[in-house]
Image (spheres, helix red, strand yellow):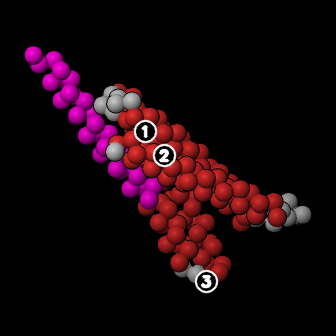
Amino acid sequence: MERYSTVILRIALFIAGAIVLAFCAATAFLALKTYPSSGYITLADVLFAGTCLAAIPFYIAMYQSFKLLRLIDADCAFSESSVKALKIIARSAFLEFIICSLGGLPFFYVLAQKDDAPGFILIGLGIAGVAFIICVFASVLNQLLQKAIAIKTENDLTI
């Protein structure tokens, strides 16, 4: 049963990575399509730069998630490698939250003002909120895993 759950999680991670890659490609296409002849930066260029910048910590966290799933399959979930992977996931999610909050929310605000659609701001808040939730969840899971490793090593030393 455990093997099937990690396969399902790997498929979900692969789909999420493909969606982010498709979004980066779509923003690149949009930026190239609206390339101005005057040389000024457009809103599409800002969207492309922000999307690519936000994709970097996402893919770092995704790689660490695959690494963590590999450790779970190898029955090494309670190891220092798992703690390190969770710490990197939490830091990447926090960086994603910062990028989405400082760069994404002003972009969505300008877009909402331009199109007179306040729902765009909720999309930006949702993206930043998901990154923050992942950051908090990974941090809590990291602390629990450290305590479990401490208990496991204490029990291993007990005769």
Magenta stretch: residue 150 in it?
yes
Dot 2 corresponds to which residue?
Answer: 10
Front: mark 2 or 3: 2
Label 1 crowding class (10 Å Cα cut-off): few <14, some 14-19, many 20+? many
Residue at numbered disc 3: 116
Secondary structure under the numbered disc 1 in the rendered image: helix
User: Residue 59 colored magenta?
Assistant: no
Location of mark 1 (residue)? 69
Which x, y percent locates residue 40?
A: 81, 62
CB under 8 Å between callouts 2 and 1? Answer: yes
Residue visible at 48% across and 60% down in the picture: 128
The three-letter code of the residue at mark 1 reads Leu
**Could you tell me the amino acid type at mark 3?**
Asp
Q: Nearer the viewer, mark 3 or mark 1?
A: 1
Q: Position of residue 43 (x, y in %)?
A: 71, 66
Query: What is the magenta range?
Result: 130-159
**77 on left or right of 59:** left
- Which mark is first along the chain, 1 or 3? 1
**Residue 65 percent across, percent down from the top left:** 46, 41
